[in-house]
Each structure stands twice: as C-alpha cells, then as structure tokens.
Amino acid sequence: MKNLFKLQKFSLYFLLLSGLAITSCNNDDDDDVPAVENEEEVITDVTLVFTNTADSTDVVTASAQDPDGPGVQELQVLGDINLDTSKTYIMTMEVMNNLETPGEDITEEIVEEGHEHQFFFSFTEGAFSNPSGDGNIDNAGDPLVYNDYDVNGNPIGLSTTWTTASTELLGGTFEVRLQHQPDIKSGSSSAQDGDSDIQLYFVLNVQ
C-alpha cells in the first residue's frame, strides 16, 4: 500500500508539472503571434476633383460610393468624367469613410502611409496630350504626371496633372487603381504589386 501511495503521489506530481509546462508553452506561443498591422481601411466615398489650371472656378468632379462600407456592396461609380478639350487640369483625390461621425478622412492616412500606397491610372489612348499613351496600369514606366511623392521620392498620386487632347472623345474610359504595397513599394513597383484598395472605372468624355 505504501508503494502504491508513493506511486500515486509521483503520478499526480508529474501531471502537475506537465500541465505547467504546457501552459508555459502556450503562453510563449501567444507572445510569438505578431500583432495585426495595416488593417484594411473602410472606404465609402471617393471623389475625383479636376480643377482647370487657367480658371480655378472651372471644376469637374466625378465620384464613387459604397454606402454599406465593408458590406456586400462595392464602390459604385455615380457619373461620368466630362472634360473640355485642350485644357490642363490638376486632379486631386478625396477618399472618405462616411460611416463614421464625423466622416473619417482616409486621404490623410494615405499620405501618412505614402511609402506603402500608389495610385495608377489607365485611360483611352489619345484622350490626353499629356500624359500621352494609355496610362501606367499596364506598364508602370508609361508616362504619368504625378505631383506628390512619399518619403522615398516615389509617387503617390493623390494629385496629378492632365492636359486634354484637342480632339473630342465620347465614351472613353478612365480607370483609377490604388495599390497597397507594404514593404514592396519602390521606383519600379507596378499596378500588379500588392493589393488593390480602390479600383474604379469611369466613362470619360472630352469635348
């Protein structure tokens, strides 16, 4: 009986030590789990604002909206882009989360994280005299006139310059894509690198 009692005590002691070891390992594993970073922002409204450089009162806007934010709906374009021929415009972007009260300006966060974000554009060839071509979504090295840059000197695209062609265009296309490129954005990164935070397709008219 004494030997049996000793064996039982030893077994209980061994089980307690094992339990402590397992708990300790689990805690270590929890400590090794990295914190979630770069959580995807909720975007409900995107507005493109084209301001004529020769007349600041001549402003053209185009927008997209996703009223349910992270719900089943996607950003939906609400109208066409209608520009005049032979004009130069500064196009700025406004990105908002209007599910918050007051609305949260996501544009500011894109600026703060500019080293991880870049807007790329595609458009009907011949719509603009500058930039020429069809945009830099298919080829990052194609011409585009960026006005803003991140801390590394790489473009962001919240401000760009566009000079329309002298010939009319009806029913053209204008695509806007925002790529999130943490740890991979560089002077040669493309629209195929990273994940798309925004991807919009507008009808473009120049007349």
Image: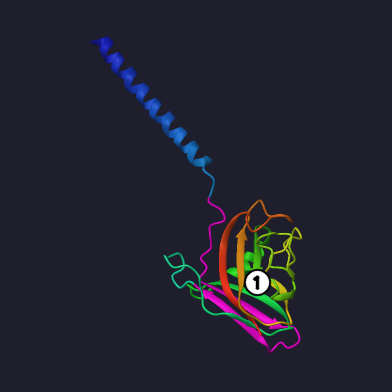
Observer-nearest of 128 and 158: 128
Name the residue at 26% across, 12% down.
4
Which quadrant would residue 110 be assigned to in this image?
A: bottom right
Which quadrant would residue 129 be assigned to in this image?
A: bottom right
Give the total of numbered labels. 1
The answer, for residue 146, to whether it is visible in the render is no
- Lateral position of residue 184 relative to residue 4, left or right: right
Query: On screen, 116 above or below 147?
Result: above
Observer-nearest of 45 and 125: 125
Whether residue 54 is in magenta: the answer is yes
The image shows residue 94 at horizontal and vertical percentages of 60, 74
Q: Secondary structure at mark 1?
A: loop
Query: On screen, 196 above or below 78?
Result: above
The image shows residue 1 at horizontal and vertical percentages of 23, 10
Name the residue at 53% across, 51% down.
36
Name the residue at 70% across, 59% down.
140
Whether residue 50 is in magenta: the answer is yes
The image shows residue 153 at horizontal and vertical percentages of 76, 60
- Residue identified by numbered label 1: 124
Say which amino acid is labelled 1: Thr
Which quadrant would residue 114 be assigned to in this image?
A: bottom right
The answer, for residue 75, to whether it is visible in the render is yes
The image shows residue 113 at horizontal and vertical percentages of 65, 61
- Lateral position of residue 157 relative to residue 72, left or right: right
